[in-house]
Image: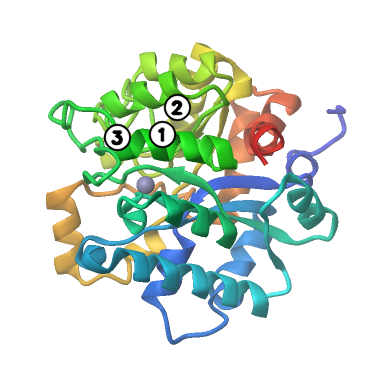
Amino acid sequence: MNADETTEKRIDRLQSGGVIDMHFDLPLGLFWNRGRQGIVAQDFLPQLEAGQASLLGVAAYVEDEHLPDALRVALDQVALLHEEIERTPRLMLCKTFAEIKKARATGRIGLLLTMEGAEPLGDDLNLVRIFYELGLRSICLTHARENAAAAGGIFAPTGSPAHGLTDFGRDLVRECERLGIILDLAHINPAGFEEICALTTRPIIVSHSNARRFHDIERNISDEQIRMIGDRRGVIGVNSILVSPREEESTLDHYIDHIEHVANLIGIDSVGIGFDFFEFIYRQWPESRQKELAAKLTTPHFIPDLRNHSHARNLTRKLIERGFRDEQIEKILRGNWVRIFREWL
Ligand SMILES: [Zn+2]
């Protein structure tokens, strides 16, 4: 930083290396809009470019009503993603660290295929190999549900299933670690969280969660869980839609309180971004479905000035205002995720 640099210039400089968001429901969005073409170019590219997004973890996720057909629906989402990438020169599917670097060097936005909930795999370990070949590079074993691998953490302070992984879940974790599919502990219940930590040795991540200290639900993570990630040199991506149970406290400043809390507990090298921008799907839902989500899980509180990728600049501006140093901001925006990719991919 030099004294003459304006804040906007400083934001430009800090973001010029790119911004990495490890949780975006793009494949689900494509599935919701199947039949339309060029969705990324029309709906998302302007925002991604305005926010200097350089890489997104894009999650295949199967909604409850499609669970009987989970494998086919997940494959549909992957096919739609591949098709969008093919028709959008600015995008590149990344399967290796070398490809992540290549996307950056050629000015493209890298996409890393992830999976949120192992339901598409059923209890068939061979399928994880197939998804790996299709590009899967990170997996959350569960969403809020229970499946053949594990149980999800619920959106309440207590009451998640007490058990950890099933035999299949343990085999799946070992296979992911062997193949090089990053293990993501977002959503899983506390027992499963602890078990995956005990079973693995590589740095594990939590792609999109918040601190229970500020929003006490089992879907978020406790200080003890945050320390477990720190002990493993993992990274926690801070989520923008669960920063507080109260709408009026769902602010950019409070988002940064979560970043600070994680950094204070386990250091600046273990905190990143997992925005979970979800409004583009939520707004397409009829009111009945929004009410169903509120009853089943929660009402997401979208932060007014952090609701799509163009708002990454607001985050950087606020980190500057809150006194974060350049090298700290660069680690939060991308550097810490890059380290994880280097170690896994
Ligand atoms: Zn999620």
Q: Earlier in the sequence, mark 3 or mark 1?
A: 3
For marks 3 and 1, give the CA distance.
Answer: 18 Å
Image quarter (top left, top right, bottom left or bottom right) of the N terminus: top right
Q: Position of residue 179 (x, y in %)?
A: 58, 42
Q: Earlier in the sequence, mark 1 or mark 2?
A: 1
Of badges 3 and 1, nearer the viewer stands 3
Q: Secondary structure at mark 3?
A: helix
At x 40% / y 65%, what residue is drawn?
74
Residue 167 marker: 3
Q: Secondary structure at mark 2?
A: helix
Please tell me whether residue 342 is drawn above or below residue 196 in the rendered image. Answer: below
At x 66% / y 53%, what residue is drawn?
95
Please tell me whether residue 119 is drawn above or below residue 74 in the rendered image. Answer: above
- Give residue 7's quadrant in the image: top right
- Residue type pointed to by label 1: Leu
For marks 2 and 3, give the CA distance.
Answer: 34 Å
Residue 185 marker: 1
Image quarter (top left, top right, bottom left or bottom right) of the C terminus: top right
Residue 12 left/right relative to 260: right
Of badges 1 and 2, nearer the viewer stands 1
At x 47% / y 34%, what residue is drawn?
174
Q: Tell me, what colour scheme is on the image?
A: rainbow
Residue 92 left/right relative to 274: right
Give the crowd class for mark 3: few <14, some 14-19, many >=20 residues within 10 Å. Answer: few
Give the crowd class for mark 2: few <14, some 14-19, many >=20 residues within 10 Å. Answer: many
Residue to which mark 2 is pinned: 258
- Give residue 93's quadrant in the image: bottom right
